[in-house]
Image (cartoon, grey):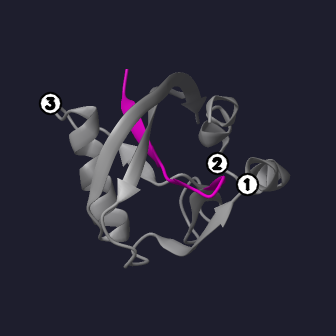
Amino acid sequence: MPKSVAGIIKKDQKFLLGKRKPGGSIGGKWEFPGGKVESKESLEDALKREFLEELDVEIEVNKFIVMKDFSTNGHKFKLYAFYIDLKSDNIKYNEHDKFDYFTIDEIKKLGDNFADSDKLLLEHL
């Protein structure tokens, strides 16, 4: 089963979300940054690669949070979430329109504007 990773950045009881650029299956939605794990790639290496690709920043992977099964468009995935720290605040907007910090309640109020797969993670943060 394919695997995906999500990096959770927590600062002052708020969590960093990125809003995807329009287009694609989650275009225009807020999400925890991350992506698919490539063949023979560790979860931690995938997370580091995805943050370099999407935000152009290096990260430190701190703690595994949870693994959740989810499906989208008939495809099943395993989503692994980790607490991480950014090594720099100099984020580039490669795949996102913007980034912002949200409380859990604010994230819940995003409703359909928040990625379905990431909704599964909220109760574990």
Q: Residue at x 40, y 39 (%)?
A: 5
Between the residue at mark 2 and the residue at mark 1, the CA separation in whole angstroms equals 16 Å
Amino acid on which disc 2 is placed? Ala
Q: Which callout, 2 or 1, points at the residue further toward the start of the chain? A: 1
78 with respect to 104 (left or right): left
Circles 3, 2 touching at the beta carbon (< 8 Å):
no
Amino acid on which disc 3 is placed? Lys
Q: Residue at x 35, y 40 (%)?
A: 62
Q: Which mark is residue 40?
A: 3
Q: Main secondary structure of the magenta part?
A: strand
Asked whether 7 or 75 is in front, the reply is 7
Amino acid on which disc 1 is placed? Thr
Helix, strand, or loop for circle 2?
Answer: loop
Magenta region, residue range: 1-14
Q: Which mark is residue 14?
A: none
- The residue that label 2 is drawn on is 115
Q: Position of residue 53 (x, y in %)?
A: 29, 64
- Asked if 23 appears above or below 33 in the picture, the reply is below
Asked whether 36 or 87 is in front, the reply is 87
Helix, strand, or loop for circle 1?
Answer: loop
- The residue that label 1 is drawn on is 103
Q: Position of residue 95 (x, y in %)?
A: 44, 69
Q: Position of residue 120 (x, y in %)?
A: 65, 32
The quarter of the picture where the N terminus appears is top left
Q: In which quarter of the view is residue 73 placed? A: top right
Asked whether 78 or 100 is in front, the reply is 100
Disc 3: CA contacts within 10 A as few (<14), some (14-19) or many (>=20): few
Circles 2, 1 touching at the beta carbon (< 8 Å):
no
Q: Which callout, 3 or 1, points at the residue further toward the start of the chain? A: 3
93 with respect to 12 (left or right): left
109 with respect to 49 (left or right): right
Disc 1: CA contacts within 10 A as few (<14), some (14-19) or many (>=20): some
